[in-house]
Image (cartoon, helix red, strand yellow):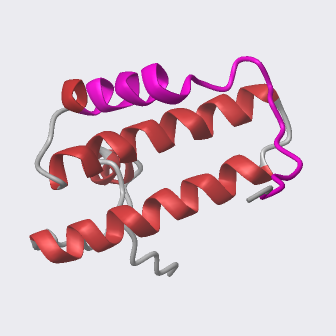
Amino acid sequence: MPVYNKLVRDLIPQVIESTGKEFRTRILDEEEYTKELVVKLKEESEEYFAAQSSKESLEELADMLEVIRALVVVHGATWEELEVLREKKVESRSGFQERVFLIDVHDNA
């Protein structure tokens, strides 16, 4: 019997149940939930880096976004508030569209 001990999407128990398999779950407290979301984000980012195609990469990015959405709530904000923060950063520092790669900075002082 495989042991997972990891945070899963809310409908995964129903998916497992539909296959006739037995399983055990528990509901995490707030502290555990936050910790496991961080673990899940790392897991999803590792899966992104291991992806072999654009399709797989996009699937993993979608998973990462879902985890990020949950983390936003854990940190007491909304997706809209996060978007405002993102936009402020774009206004002050722009984005990554121009593909600028910083090589070094010389301090002439």
Q: Nearer the viewer, residue 28 or 20?
A: 28
Please tell me whether residue 100 is drawn above or below residue 29 in the rendered image. above
Q: Is residue 90 left or right of residue 98?
A: left
- Quarter of the image for residue 57 reads top right
What percent of the width, then of the height, locates residue 65? 44, 37
Q: Is residue 29 magenta?
A: no
Q: Nearer the viewer, residue 72 or 12?
A: 72
Q: Nearer the viewer, residue 46 or 106?
A: 106
Q: Nearer the viewer, residue 22 or 14?
A: 14
Looking at the rendered image, the quarter that the C terminus falls into is bottom right
What percent of the width, then of the height, locates residue 5? 39, 78
Q: Could you tell me which residue is drawn at 50 percent across and 81 percent down? A: 1
Q: Is residue 101 magenta?
A: yes
- Quarter of the image for residue 21 reads bottom left
Q: Could you tell me which residue is drawn at 78 percent across and 27 percent down? A: 54
In this rendering, the count of numbered labels is 0
Q: Is residue 24 left or right of residue 30?
A: right
What percent of the width, then of the height, locates residue 31? 16, 75
What percent of the width, then of the height, locates residue 25? 23, 70
Instruction: Tell me where the magenta segment starts and ends, as one range.
Output: 82-107
Please tell me whether residue 61 is drawn above or below residue 9 in the rendered image. above
Q: Could you tell me which residue is drawn at 25 percent across and 67 percent down? A: 34
Q: Is residue 75 left or right of residue 94?
A: left
- Quarter of the image for residue 85 reads top left
Q: Could you tell me which residue is drawn at 86 percent across and 52 percent down? A: 104
